Image: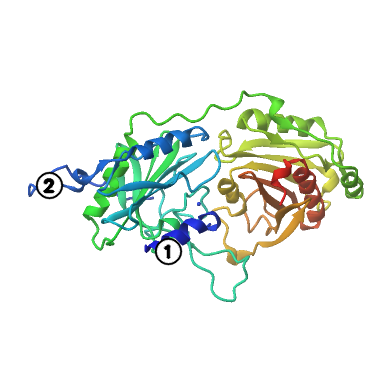
Amino acid sequence: MFANRCHFALAAVAVVVAGCGGHTASRQTATGTNGQRSPSATLHPAPASVATACRVLARSLALGVLCPTRLPKGRWAVSHRTLRTGRCAYLLDLNTRPFGQNIAFHELAGGRCGQWPLATRSGRWPAHSALADDLGLIGAKALRAGQPSVTIPTPVRPRVLRRIEIAGHHGLLLQEAGYPSGGVHGGHIAAIWNQGADGYVLSLHFTEQPHAPITSWQQIVIDAAEAMSRSTTPIAPAARPPQSAGNVIERTPAQALRRRGAPLNLTSALPRSVKGACATAAAKSQAVVYCPPLVPTGPTLVDGVDGILSSRDFRAGFVANFTSHSVQPSRSAPGHWTLAEGEPETLRALLYPPSYNVRDGSITQRQIRIDRTSATLWLMPAFRVLHSIYGGHAVVTWRCAGREYQVSMHGHNNAQRTVLIATSLADELPVTCRR
């Protein structure tokens, strides 16, 4: 990765979309059989600025921060404290000074809420390319000239070098595709592993690329990852606000919105079921939850309030499912609608579930404005094609202060209702989010 390419990758990271069988790799010792020092002996203590960056990160994260403590030879500096936003992911960016100096010259180290899936397919990881919070490990093919800007890029999965253990934790050693297809990790060798309830990564870029199954560069990555894994006790995540329904924000929508909602069977009189779902989401996610000011009229049933990472893990956000018969897309279909808030990378998995194949049916999307906010309207294929809660739904998504919001309703004929509910919710968010 050349200097100009690396700078471009870092600038573009925000828009780059972040096994069966095998064996445990044998470990090399500090001194090889020929008496020469192994790669582990070439690692040196990380500068104090790295530990400082990790401590600052831990103040705002919902997961324990593992910090790189040993690095290959060189004058290392923190280029970016993190290339990820939100409370459930971090990706520390380190470079040598001057840039590109020494054999290993670029390191990325980070973690995410929830363990990595370690299943592989056809020598690639992960088994399914639709992975929430991939920390940039899954690259994307660049769009060809003439392709519309809304074209979904083809994912580029890294190649699996072998299965490994990082300080006793199961993981994988990966070879990332070269830049630009490999994204921010382009050309890197990456070690990923699960530690506790979360997943971590350390990747290094070298001036030479490995051509053999086992090389000294791969061992350097493993050794650096083990040092990161053993970095005493992980820096504790930030304290969260107390659990209470006081984190729910409810406001009366503007009169103009109420008038527009009446013909569409939307009301500002929120039923107890919806208020209760918002309170549950706030208590379990320990975050500020904005309850939609406009909802379908009539009785509304709560089908569940679940975490995004798993039904009980709310660290990355939540999704609430409702049924309202006043907005049935047809006589035989239930009036299913949803509200989701959370980490942008994680919530994207709701739009692209692992089982989705674009050849079976395409997702239509277009840019819209809700209130004074930029948003995207998605028309999703039927459930038989898109096996997720959004099968057959109209979905509106937008972001505010590093958090993503999604409102959906079953039936493309309910797109106007979905947009108006989203508009009322966007109007409720802080003014600074309007753009």
Residue 166 in sight here? no
Name which residue lies at 47% across and 61% down: 8
Q: Position of residue 316 (x, y in %)?
A: 57, 39
- Residue under numbered circle 1: 5
The answer to whether the residues at label 1 and label 2 have Cβ atoms under 8 Å apart is no
User: What is the C-alpha distance between the residues marked 1 and 2?
Assistant: 36 Å
Q: Residues within 10 Å of mark 1 (few under 14, many from 20)?
A: some
Name which residue lies at 48% across and 39% down: 114
Q: Mark 1: which amino acid?
A: Arg
Q: Quadrant of the N terminus?
A: bottom left
Q: Is residue 309 left or right of residue 108?
A: right
Disc on res. 261: none
Q: Is residue 206 above or below residue 148?
A: above
- Residue under numbered circle 2: 32
Q: Position of residue 92 (x, y in %)?
A: 42, 45
Q: Secondary structure at mark 2?
A: loop
Q: Is residue 314 above or below residue 74?
A: above
Q: Position of residue 94 (x, y in %)?
A: 38, 48
Q: Mark 2: which amino acid?
A: Gly
Q: Position of residue 407 (x, y in %)?
A: 72, 47
